[in-house]
Image: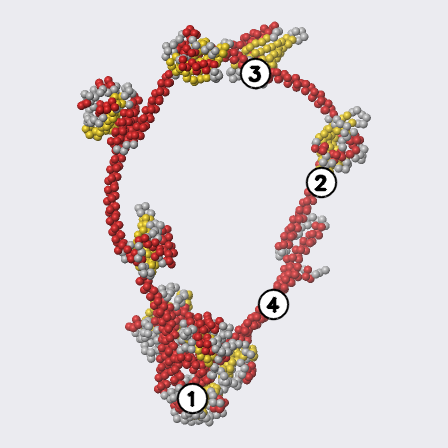
Amino acid sequence: MILVVEDNPDHLELTLMALQEDGRRSEIAVARDGVEAISYLFGEGVHGGRDTTHQPDLVLLDLKLPKLTGLEVLQRMRGDPRTAAVPVVILTSSGEEEDIAASYRSGANSFMRKPVDFGEFTEKLRQVQDYWLQVNQVKASG
Amino acid sequence: MFRLWGSLRAQLVLLVVVTTVPLMVWVTANAYWQARAGLERARTNLHFASSMGALHVAQIIESARATLVTVASTARIQSGLPEGCATFFRSVAPQLPAYGSLGVFNPDGHVRCSSLAKDDAPVFAGDRRYFQEAMGAGRFAVSTYTRSRISQAEVILFAQPVRRPDDGRVTGVAYAAMDLRTLQRAMDQLQLPPITRFRIMDRDGTVLAASSDLRETVGSRVRVPVLQRAVASAVAGIEDGEGADGRRAMFALVPVGAGTGVFVSVSLDREVAIGIAAKQIGLQLLGLFLLMLIGCYLAWRAGGRAILEPTRQILEVTQQLQMGRGGTRVGLLPRSTVDELVQISAGFNRMADALQQREGQHVAFEAQVRHAHDQLDLVLNSMKEAVLAVDQDSRLLLSNHAAAMLFDLARPRLPAARWPAHFGLYHAGTDRLLSLDRLLRPDAPERAVADFDLDVRKPGGADVRTLRCSVQPLLSGANMFGILMVMTDITDIRALQAAQARNLADLEELQRKLVEALETGRIGNWEFDLAAQRLWWSDETYVLFGLAKGGFDGRFATVLQHIHPDDRDRVVRQRDSAIAAGEVHEVEYRIVLPDGSLRWMNQIGRSYCDARGRALRRAGVVQDITERKLTEQALLASEQRYVALFKQSPLPMWVSDPASARFLAVNEAAVAQYGYSREEFSALTLRDIRPASEWSRLEGLLHGAGPADQGGERWLHRRKDGSEFPVEIVWKHIPHGDRRAMFVVALDVSARVRAEAEVHDDMQTLRRMNAAAQAIAGQATLQGTLQQVVVQARGVVGAHLAVITLAQGDDWAQAINKVSVSDKYGDWQGREIPAQSGRGMHALVCETNQPLRLTQAEFEAHPRRSGFGAHAGDHPPVRGWLAVPLVGADRKNMGVLQLADKVDGEFSERDEYVAIELAQLAATAIEKTRLIEEVRNFNAHLEARIARRTAELARQEALFRALAEQAPQVVWTADTSGAVSYLNRHWFDLTGGGAADGLGYGWMTALHPDDLAGVRTQWRLGRRGKATFSGVRRIRALNGSYHTMSYRAAPVHDALGQVSFWVGIDTDITEFKAVEAALVLSNRELAAFSYSVSHDLRSPLSAIDGFSRLLARQSGMAAQPQAQHYLTRIQAGVAQMGQMIEGLLALAQVSRASLRSEPVRLDRIARDILERLQASQPDRRVAVTVEEGLTLDGDPRLLQVAMENLLGNAWKFSAQREDAAIAVGQLPGQRVFYVQDNGAGFDMAYSDKLFGVFQRLHSVSEFPGTGIGLATVQRIVARHEGRVWAQSGPGSGATFFFSVADGALVQPGSG
């Protein structure tokens, strides 16, 4: 399952398109700001009662978010044992060195700058999915 | 018995082996671990490389799929009709050069149309698996290795079913054939790690592409069994196996994507991974083994030569020495002998030398001992004393001949302890037997007495002999092992000594008595041998004559020479008559001592006759009687002197009887003094020469218990004429005949009493003088001083009239006069003193500068007397006149002090002295008061000047204060302790406080608390260095806001160069600060802006691009080429916009980034960039020249960006030339670098626009670009303190130069 945290509706739609490109049918959850992402991840508020032992296999996280920023979400995730190991890929239009450095300091697994070219974006997202969902191993396989 | 490991050389060999073996073990283990690590690394590398390869191939397949999806969604293809089909593919194919052919199959398997123009022979693909898969399963399929039936090329095909949009029926299969060489090129570009090889296989294990050096044939089955198995089972992983060339290798296999049936394998020679380690271990082990063998051999040889041979030699010599051959020595050892053995053999030889020498010494010593023993025997036996030595056990150790004669020692074995009893040895004079046992005890008391006497009494015999026995312990170290006795027979000596001692005692007693008698009476003995005519003197006689003992030759004539010449005849005469008469004679005479003094002697002598009465000798004594003679003479002289003194003394003296108080004797002086004759005196008593008032005192003296002698008492005596006079008497009780009398000396002291009175008067005058001087000196004005002088002068001297005249130059009419008069002149008080003329007597005094003292008569008769002027009629006569001049410090006359009409008698000399003193005092006082008046005048003048000056200063200060008050800055002054003493109006306008709030240290309350420490530091520094100090501080204004002030203070020095006070000015720079802050804020906003450009401007671009692409995919859009074209243009525009934003961001980054400076290799950077450019466009041929070793100091990241732009431009603008050339270099000897190309160039007329942002000299269609690159370059170079410029002409290429400063970098915010 993939959790996409994105506030810009244009970007969200494009991201979802790109993720489903190629006929993939991954289960996708969406959070439109940092607070919603947190409440989803920890089963609070509107997502009360969610089984929090079942966490996303990948979180695509934008940095510029209303309410809680992407970095704050990331820090909260890394501070909680339930989400500490969940792979997080930062997905943002900024390429600032400071943003990259801050992301890795806060525990991001990967930093991806959204390319303007949609084809490129799609291709990159596909690689991200391939790697984090297929190649990467989070838990010991049963 | 030979022990193998007991041998030293064997142990050496063993040591070599033991050292080498662990080394070999270590080498082996090390190689093993290196091999393990190499394998592990290789696995990691393989995993990485194969994943990368698989991803790359997957991308290729994916792009083919995307292409085919697009084709399949084209309406023209979906329709299933052949019309326009070939045209479509031929128009699309050039845009997709990766595929050798594109086309579509009909559902029956025949090619409907393709991009290749081979329509004549319809190709059938219905039997191909990929076709069946795409057709049957209706999904994208990838073929296995295929030889194209159209082009005969080796290809791999991708197939995508085409569905009709209305019913979804499959109307065909679109395909794309990729030439395997294209695949091969794509893989070659992937740049896998250089030691790895790749293979791409289809599901049958047929090789599709492989690294060129793998000897795999495309199209045939892979020749590696391991891979064949892995492909068959389609299992990913890493396996070891044999390669096609038979070498061991590791193979990583990864399937590409899902269901594509393509596998990527990457292999690595096992030997490459671990080869080095494996090869090395064999060599190293062999080397170590050889080393060990050589070591063993050397140890064996060295052990033999260096140790065994020398040891054998030493052993042989030891045996020789044992056999007594003392001269044997260890010979020369082999040169390789170890040092320790050489030292041992040298030590061994030294030891043998020492042994030989000892033996020689021993023999010589024995001979000496024998000789000494013989000599001892000789000495012992020649001694008269008996010598016996006995040991602790009473055994006789030694005896000599004398001992044998004394005791019968021939009888052997008589223990010494029994000798006393046997030989009768007793302690001298006792019946106590000698105990040898006690002597032999170590603590024997007898031994403390070194010598003692023994009696030898033979039993029954009366013969007793006495022996002096001396005992000494025989010591061995501190222990006694016996005693040595030396015995001397002293029997005869004892007897002799006793007799002598008795005689001596008698004689001594006799002599003592005689000497005593003689010494007591200073009496000397003499004896004269008449026959020999020799004279003998006792010691005392010598002393009496003042001669050293023996200093007399015994002749009588010599004696005479010592006798006084006047006495010689008498002495000779008396002596001769006495000898003739044979009677006793006594004579007194004087002798002359050697020092010339005389001594009186009394000599008595008598004759001693033989039996016949003939005189043999005369003997007698001589005695010193000088003292007696002198006393007799002195007594006589004393009496005579006394009488003469009494008679002739000028002092009155008498002797009186204290009982009757009558005069017993009176001298001439008394007669003269008292006026009584000697006869009258004899009738008088002591009372008669005194007034009656002294009588009772006299009684006390005569009968009282007063002291016997007295002197210095003062009495009043009376002469015969009744006049009285003071005397001092001295008396003494003396014997007068048989009575006690009183001797009196009376001294007339009337003169002394008079002198004392005069002294008293003088003292009084001096006291008055002193008071007068104080009174005069106490006057402050001239008039007062003059008045006081006359008053005091008249009082001290005692006159009725005193006048002082102070001359004013020569004009006597102007002279100042002061007068003092007594009551006698009472009615003269206050009368006007007439002006003095310059001719009178006082003028005379002034002219001569000498005092003048006249009696009344002299005064009245003086020729220059001017009379009393107008008062001549009623002026009483003056008794005497005294005038003294007033003389200044310069010895010039100032005036005259006159005293007239003395109260008592005439003016004396003393009065004159007093007047002179007073005049001197007056002169000094007058000069002093004149001086004071001058000073007072001068002071008054000075004060006026000061007042003028003060007023001027006040005016100046008012001016400065007004200036300071009006100044637009805060002006202040502070004293040296930092307390503020002045603040101008601006301060109070600013802070609003009153004067008390700012002055002193009050201003500190208006200071911003954070600035206090800084101001204090500056103040301390300034004060220590006495120098100007400055800084910035914030002052709280009236409205509570803080104003930023730039202050500067300087010291003001006084005439001595010391700091007098400080002056400072605070300038309000608040507005300046605000502008500065705004600038900083603006810079921050700029940074925020560029961030937002990065984030926010790109965001909508992504949306535009994304949705335009999605739009292009929409069904229906594909049928509208115009719409597709527009969408493509939109995407191109978006891409251009994205690049421009990127460029702008980079430009901003250049300005914002902080730089670090380090050496940068510009040539390497240039080569890397050029290689990348070449790789991006492999078809272009560009001649590249990069100068070697281009190095400069700078920021490596920025310089990389600059070079990317410059080289990118060069690459871009030379694209249209066949013979493109690019050069990078440095101007010789300068820090100027350049990038040169021979491309399109530009017109130098526009060179000023070259480096502006968005400035372009070529159209986008001509050369693509954003117009930011060169601006970025310029900014980077500027950050390096450098300059960039260009040279060019249209069509003649361009050269871009840039210079950099030496290591200087401009940090952001500083420029």
Looking at marks 4 and 1 on the same chain, the residue that comes earlier in the sequence is marked by 4
| Whole-percent x, y for residue B878 in the image | 24, 20
According to the picture, the residue beneath numbered tag 1 turns out to be: B72
The image shows residue B77, relative to residue B970, as above or below, that is below
What secondary structure is marked by label 4? helix
- Residue B919 seen by the camera: no
What secondary structure is marked by label 2? helix
Looking at marks 2 and 3 on the same chain, the residue that comes earlier in the sequence is marked by 2
**Could you give the CA–CA distance between mark 1 and mark 3, rounded to whole angstroms?**
179 Å
What secondary structure is marked by label 1? helix
Relative placement, left or right, of B225 versus B1221 is right
Residue depth check, mark 4 versus mark 3: number of the one nearer the observer? 3
**Label 1–label 3 contact, CB within 8 A:** no
Q: Which residue is nearer to you in this view: B539 or A124?
A: A124
| Whole-percent x, y for residue B652 in the image | 41, 12
Crowdedness of circle 3 by 10 Å Cα count: few (<14), some, many (20+)?
some
Q: Which residue is nearer to you in this view: A110 or B1249?
A: A110
Relative placement, left or right, of B823 versus B1175 is left
Relative placement, left or right, of B1225 versus B257 is left
| Whole-percent x, y for residue B271 in the image | 55, 75
The label on residue B1110 is none
Say yes or no: labels 1 and 2 on the same chain: yes
